[in-house]
Image (spheres, rainbow, N blue to C red):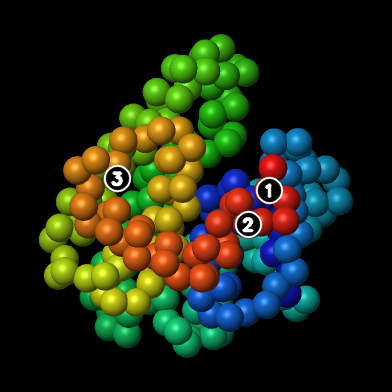
């Protein structure tokens, strides 16, 4: 099983966490987004969307981190990354999508590059943009957590799909000096995750292509 990914990609980070939580070995294939590796013909030939991550099992090829993680969860149901009950699954998906669909699209590398190269936004303005949308999104995430029963992780006492999304977002936020004050449930879940080897090993600084 191969995972085509980039060490700083939040979406790639999510899948690395899921693979590690499930104890699934994989070949790490680096695709350096900042250097344009994803636009090269050889990658375009296997990745229709030209994005990372891409999971290649030898039999199937899948893109989009959320789809990949749910596919892995269905094929390898232990440990489960989604609750057994329908409402629990919906709650976890809502948390995960609050990050993957609301925060991340506004702040991924393509967007930040467009702000600088095409719209001529300076570095500080770009960083202010990033911090604003991450902070606003995490405040919403915190309000959602506050409506749930107390738990070690985002939902319950084992990591779920929501934690797979939260940890990369916090890690990237730290690079941009996002203010995490006043987010007790969010940061408690993050800290709980970062005590686990699956999250530590998946972290960007521990990837073979880390710079």
Q: Secondary structure at mark 2?
A: helix
Give left or right: position of 64 versus 89.
right
Q: Which residue is mark 2?
A: 206
Residue under the image location 66 percent in, 56 percent down: 207
From this view, report whether residue 33 is shown above or below residue 64: above
Specify few, some or many for label 2: CA neighbours under 10 Å numbering under 14, 14-19, or 20 or more. few
Judge left or right: residue 180 versus residue 182.
right
Residue, far front:
195
From the image, state whether disc 3 or disc 2 is nearer to you.
2
**What whole-number distance in Å separates the C-alpha atoms at marks 2 and 1?**
7 Å
Q: Residue furthest right?
A: 42
| Distance in Å between CA atoms under marks 3 and 1 | 26 Å
Q: Circle 1 sits in a helix, a strand or a loop, which is it?
A: loop
Q: Is residue 19 visible?
A: yes
Front of the two marks 3 and 1:
1
Residue 138's disc is: 3
Where residue 146 appears, x then y in whole percent?
15, 58
Give the SS element for disc 3.
helix
* Mark 3 to mark 2 CA distance (whole Å): 25 Å
| Label 1 crowd (10 A; few <14 / some 14-19 / many >=20) | few
Q: Are marks 3 and 1 in contact (CB under 8 Å)?
A: no
Q: At x 54% / y 80%, what residue is drawn?
A: 22
Q: Residue at x 53, y 22 (%)?
A: 115
The image quarter in which residue 95 lies: bottom left
Q: Are marks 2 and 1 in contact (CB under 8 Å)?
A: yes
Residue 210: numbered disc = 1
- For residue 49, say whether it is visible: no
């Amino acid at each position: 099983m191969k995972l085509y990914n980039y060490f700083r990609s939040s979406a790639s980070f999510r899948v690395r966490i899921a693979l590690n939580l499930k104890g699934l070995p994989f070949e790490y294939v680096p695709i350096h987004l900042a250097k344009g590796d994803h636009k090269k013909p050889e990658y375009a030939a296997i990745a229709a969307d030209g994005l990372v991550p891409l999971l290649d099992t030898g039999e199937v090829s899948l893109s989009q981190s959320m789809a990949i993680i749910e596919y892995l969860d269905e094929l390898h149901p232990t440990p489960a990354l989604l609750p057994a009950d329908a409402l629990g699954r919906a709650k976890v998906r809502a948390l995960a999508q609050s990050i993957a669909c609301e925060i991340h699209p506004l702040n991924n590398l393509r967007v930040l590059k467009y702000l600088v190269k095409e719209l001529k936004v300076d570095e500080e303005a770009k960083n202010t943009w990033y911090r604003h949308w991450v902070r606003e999104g995490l405040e919403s995430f915190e309000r959602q957590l506050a409506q749930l029963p107390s738990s070690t992780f985002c939902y319950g006492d084992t990591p779920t799909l929501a934690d797979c999304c939260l940890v990369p977002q916090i890690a990237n936020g730290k690079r941009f000096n996002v203010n995490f004050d006043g987010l007790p449930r969010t940061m408690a879940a993050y800290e709980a995750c970062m005590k686990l080897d699956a999250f530590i090993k998946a972290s960007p600084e521990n990837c073979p292509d880390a710079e």
